[in-house]
């Protein structure tokens, strides 16, 4: 971004596109929409949408940036900034002095380096995501110099960034300034436009300085005002803007090398061309409008009259800077310019206008007049910034989506709010909030029909009561019916909504709709319970039974018996006569009530069903004739008026009961009944019982019945293993629960039952469950028993010690100590942990010390360390133990020393004998053969072992020099034994697993190591 001649180059953030299903925006009919008809080169008329019909909002918060230190402030105020560049979370300022300054988010100068010795830095580009910075310096009439800097590679001597490459930009030796600059993100191609109308493209590897080629791709008489790249797959297109036209040429890919093609026979000023990074569209602003150019040519245009000096794309907005009007400007300006700070304000203050447009949603997001002209626009740290001529920087921070919506709400522009929410990607629930607010606005205006349409759009996420309360007035009952019917269509209606809808039908006496609603075929669109409840509230139990019978709702039949008639015994008998599936559902639903009023019978039903012995009863139900119930009370007339006439009940007569047994069940819901057992009870196949655990929650607050149920289930033989675990565990818990009741009369009896239960051999109760339940119920016998069965003797002992039960600890030590030797060190630590415990232990401490000493459970030093942790034990208590230990150790040391000396003497004798045999001549005095015993005669063979033989008595080979190959026949057996032993030791030396196994099994670790050391396991092999 070169500020001296109003050049603009800056990277932009991605831009989200507006959804295609946006609600159309209504414009105030009092505002005249204007359109500018423009004709392109091909004679096609295009409609340019004028901005004077767009709404203006204040969607941005503007704050002035204050530099934190004097150095940064003085540099900004000095007007020495020649260009601005942002990227990689850093801001770069190029100066007229050839230096580059890097600013922090607080606008403090963090780093500065001299990039050029002469000339001003006019253009910069930072490659996003890297530490590369491209700078261009101009010092006319010399050629411009381009440098690529690696900011993360400082030079050791100077500390400056490393210059990766340096290049002189060629323009045919014509001293014209650079008017436009663009580069690809990988710096593989760069485009430079000059004021004389030529464009130079640079290709090569500038990052690694592997050379670059320059080529002039376009020349004209009109100055170049802008260059931008558009990259799509393998095709790279360069757009060039001059003061007279817009052109494009392919510089890489299919069609490369062809002449530039005209896109528009109208150009633009410097800084008035940019690119939308999201879709690659080129954006050009002229004095009459804003133009978009796509891959196929010119796209939409938006009329905006007036001069423009800068344009940039920020997020979803187009940022425009309009310079102050010239003195030749006529006072008759458009209403749009007056809105943006034109007319009299411009002439008085000579201000420039800064505007942010949302061209997708067609509104002005921000507009203001600036006293000082804008030198540069740049985007960084998520915000938009402007740099003015007087060195001031202003931050433009977009307000949150909720704040923007609130602004639209305040102006009742709900369609704009819907479009904004859809573009921002809000979910349906949040959009429905806007529909609901729009409906509230229309409701306040009195447009009830339109308001209801908005409420219907938001029906999925709107609390129905909020809408229903608005339309309870009689005059708006038709809107209320429409909303309630839609609730039922969306299956969002509750019982109250069904009740209200039936009331509305009744109030309007709309019999057709009411009958259609109640008797509608297919899936239910209303809550059946509610419809039946309406009949029950009016006392029309026959109608309620009709609906329940029609839809096979046995639960509602039982509910009428229990909730309305309070005939619990009859309800239980009705449930007993249902098929197993239906009986199970009703039994579980009303189990608590039935157990409360009929505990014995209800428990028996539970037992029969969950043990697989359930049979539906087939008793006949006799229904006496009943007089017709009186009509509704006066207060309920509007709710169920004429329901009796609407709901004929052909199944409720006594003749129907006699002829259709299935309807006899319905008759029990409407009158006093008499149950008579049928003489011919039919046998039914045995049902498969469900898991007993699903019935456990039904027996809450009924422990006695629960225990009866559990004990009955456990009597069955074919129980599955998971069911047995659940039943035994729960029964054990209930026994403990009964033992801890406040009455406590039979505590010992229940604890005895619990103990007997877990003492069984095949009781599949998990140990952890027994431990947990016993602990929670303070049932110590259970804890001890389970730990004994699990072999957790140490835990039993520890439970006594944690409870400070010394007697119990001594008892456990005596009982489990022989099988669990580690209990003795733990007992030693416990007995000496407290004076009172030591006193209770008595002579048991000496017994523990004696056991530890006899079995070698602890070293003497460990015993002393254990006793020295506190001041409870005294030296007098362990004096005998220490004396015995010291005497034993001394005797062992003396014995070991004596054995060592004997081994040393024997070893020395053997060594002396070997030395004598190997160094001194030997005299053989034998006169008889050691084999045959006769007089020794020549030839004779003598061995170093002092045995002599006739040569004929032994089978050996005698060499020419008199040496004998072979062993003495008398000593051969012993020698072979010794060789085999040595060979065995050599083989054992490589069997490390044997050594580790012996080390793990033997209690005397050091002795084991010594033994294997003597066998040569740890000898270092000789080097050949």
Image (cartoon, grey):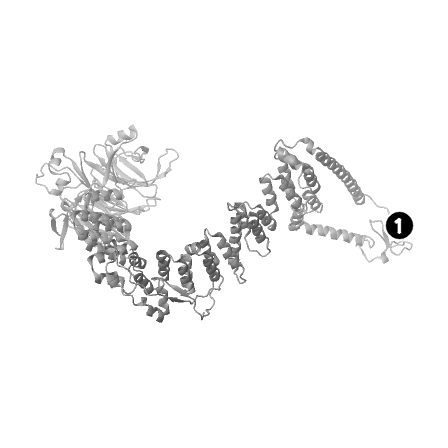
Residue 921 image offset from top left, x and y in percent: 83, 45
Tell me which residue sits at (24%, 63%) in the image.
645
Tell me which residue sits at (43%, 64%) in the image.
580
> Of 447 and 260, which appears nearest the observer?
447
Whether 344 is drawn above or below 431: the answer is above
Q: Is residue 891 left or right of residue 30?
A: right
Q: Is residue 598 left or right of residue 749?
A: left
Quadrant occupied by the N terminus: top left
Q: Is residue 595 left or right of residue 116?
A: right
Instruction: Give the quarter of the image for residue 500.
Output: bottom left
Q: Residue furthest top?
A: 70
Residue 55 image offset from top left, x and y in percent: 17, 45
Label 1: how many residues lie within 10 Å, few (<14), some (14-19) or many (20+)? some
Residue 985 image offset from top left, x and y in percent: 71, 50
Q: Residue furthest right?
A: 935
- For the image, the number of numbered tags is 1
Q: Is residue 149 visible?
A: yes
Q: Is residue 746 left or right of residue 616?
A: right
Whether 533 is drawn above or below 889: the answer is below
Residue 278 image offset from top left, x and y in percent: 26, 49
Residue that mark 1 sits on = 926
User: Which secondary structure lies at badge 1?
Assistant: loop
> Of 846 and 348, which appears nearest the observer?
846
Q: Is residue 219 visible?
A: no
Instruction: Give the quarter of the image for residue 69.
Output: top left
């Amino acid at each position: 971004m070169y500020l001296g001649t109003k050049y603009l180059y800056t990277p932009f953030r991605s831009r989200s596109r507006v959804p295609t299903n946006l609600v159309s925006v209504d414009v105030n009919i009092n505002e005249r929409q204007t359109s500018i008809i423009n004709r392109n080169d091909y004679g096609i008329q295009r409609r340019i949408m004028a901005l004077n019909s767009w709404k203006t909002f204040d969607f941005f918060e503007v704050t002035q940036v204050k530099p934190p230190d004097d150095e940064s402030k003085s540099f900004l105020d000095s007007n020495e900034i020649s260009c601005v560049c942002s990227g990689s979370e850093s801001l770069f300022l190029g100066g007229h002095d050839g230096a580059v300054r890097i600013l922090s988010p607080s606008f403090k100068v963090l780093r500065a380096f001299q990039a050029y010795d002469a000339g001003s830095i006019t253009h910069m580009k930072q490659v996003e995501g890297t530490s590369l910075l491209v700078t261009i310096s101009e010092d006319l009439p010399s050629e411009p110099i381009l440098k690529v800097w690696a900011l993360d590679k400082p030079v050791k001597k100077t500390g400056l960034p490393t210059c990766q490459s340096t290049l002189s930009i060629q323009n045919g030796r014509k001293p014209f300034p650079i008017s436009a600059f663009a580069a690809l993100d990988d710096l593989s191609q760069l485009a430079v436009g000059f004021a004389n109308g030529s464009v130079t493209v640079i290709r090569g590897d500038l990052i690694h300085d592997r050379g670059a080629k320059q080529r002039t791709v376009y020349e004209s008489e009109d100055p170049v005002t802008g260059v931008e790249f558009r990259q799509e797959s393998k095709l790279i297109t360069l757009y060039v803007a001059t003061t007279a036209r817009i052109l494009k040429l392919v510089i890489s890919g299919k069609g490369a090398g062809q002449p530039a093609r005209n896109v528009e026979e109208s150009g633009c000023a410097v800084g008035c061309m940019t690119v939308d990074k999201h879709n690659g569209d080129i954006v050009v602003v002229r004095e009459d409008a804003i133009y978009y150019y796509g891959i196929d040519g010119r796209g939409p245009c938006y009329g905006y009259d007036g001069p423009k000096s800068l344009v940039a794309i920020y997020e979803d907005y187009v940022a425009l800077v309009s310079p102050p009007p010239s003195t030749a400007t006529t006072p008759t300006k458009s209403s749009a310019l007056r809105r943006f700070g034109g007319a009299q304000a411009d002439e008085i203050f000579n201000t420039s206008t800064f505007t942010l447009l949302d061209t997708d949603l067609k509104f002005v997001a921000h507009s203001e007049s600036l006293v000082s002209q804008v030198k540069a626009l740049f985007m960084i740290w998520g915000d938009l910034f402007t740099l003015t001529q007087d060195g001031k920087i202003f931050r433009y921070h977009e307000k949150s989506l909720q704040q923007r919506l609130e602004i639209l709400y305040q102006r009742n522009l709900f369609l704009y709010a819907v479009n904004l929410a859809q573009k921002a990607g809000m979910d349906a629930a949040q959009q429905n909030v806007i529909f609901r607010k729009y409906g509230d606005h229309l409701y306040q205006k009195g447009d009830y029909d339109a308001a209801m349409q908005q409420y219907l759009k938001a029906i999925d996420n709107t609390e129905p009561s909020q809408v229903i309360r608005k339309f309870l007035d009689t005059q708006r009952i038709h809107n209320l019916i429409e909303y309630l019917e839609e609730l039922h269509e969306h299956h969002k209606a509750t019982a109250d909504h069904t009740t209200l809808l039936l009331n509305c039908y009744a109030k309007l006496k709309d019999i057709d709709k009411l009958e259609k609603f109640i008797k509608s075929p297919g899936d239910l669109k209303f809550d059946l319970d509610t419809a039946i409840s309406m009949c029950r509230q009016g006392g029309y139990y026959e109608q309620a039974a009709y609906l329940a019978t029609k839809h096979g709702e046995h639960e509602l039949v039982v509910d009428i018996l229990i909730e309305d008639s309070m005939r619990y015994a009859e309800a239980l008998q009705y449930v007993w006569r249902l098929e197993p599936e239906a009986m199970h559902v009703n039994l579980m639903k009303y189990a608590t009530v039935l157990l409360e009023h009929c505990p014995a019978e209800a428990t028996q039903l539970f037992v029969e069903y969950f043990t697989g012995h359930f049979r539906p009863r087939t008793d006949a139900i006799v229904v006496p004739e009943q007089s017709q119930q009186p009509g509704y009370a006066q207060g309920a007339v509007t709710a169920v008026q004429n329901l009796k006439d609407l709901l004929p009940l052909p199944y409720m007569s006594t003749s129907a009961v006699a002829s259709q047994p299935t309807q006899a069940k319905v008759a029990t819901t409407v009158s006093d009944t008499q149950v008579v057992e049928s003489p011919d009870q039919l046998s039914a196949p045995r049902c498969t019982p469900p898991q007993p655990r699903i019935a456990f929650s039904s027996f809450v607050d009924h422990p006695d019945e629960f225990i009866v149920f559990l004990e009955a289930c456990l009597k069955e033989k074919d129980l599955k293993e998971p069911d047995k675990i659940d039943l035994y565990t729960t029964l054990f818990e209930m026994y403990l629960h009964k033992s801890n009741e406040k009455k406590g009369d039979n505590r010992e009896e229940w604890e005895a039952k619990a103990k007997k239960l877990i003492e069984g051999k095949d009781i599949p109760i998990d140990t952890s469950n027994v431990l947990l339940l016993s602990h929670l119920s303070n049932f110590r016998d259970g804890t001890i028993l389970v730990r004994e069965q699990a072999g957790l003797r140490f835990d039993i002992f520890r439970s006594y010690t944690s409870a400070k039960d010394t007697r119990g600890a001594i008892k456990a030590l005596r009982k489990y100590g022989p099988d669990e030797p580690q209990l003795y060190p733990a007992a030693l630590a416990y007995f000496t942990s407290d004076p009172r415990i030591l006193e209770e232990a008595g002579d048991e401490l000496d017994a523990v010390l004696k056991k530890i000493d006899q079995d070698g459970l602890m070293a003497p030093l460990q015993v002393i360390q254990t006793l020295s942790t506190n001041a409870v034990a005294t030296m007098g208590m362990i004096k005998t133990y220490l004396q015995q230990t010291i005497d034993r150790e001394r005797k062992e040391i003396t014995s070991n020393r004596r054995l060592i000396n004997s081994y040393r003497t024997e070893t020395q004798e053997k060594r002396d004998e070997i030395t004598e045999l190997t160094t001194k001549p030997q005299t053989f005095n034998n006169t008889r053969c050691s084999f045959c015993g006769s007089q020794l005669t020549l030839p004779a063979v003598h061995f170093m072992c002092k045995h002599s033989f006739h040569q004929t008595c032994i089978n050996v080979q005698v060499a020419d020099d008199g040496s004998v190959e072979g062993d003495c026949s008398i000593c051969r057996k012993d020698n072979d034994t010794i060789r085999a032993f040595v060979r065995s030791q050599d083989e054992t030396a490589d069997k490390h697993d044997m050594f580790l196994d012996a080390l793990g099994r033997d209690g005397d670790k050091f002795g084991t190591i010594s033994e294997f050391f003597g066998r040569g396991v740890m000898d270092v092999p000789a080097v050949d």
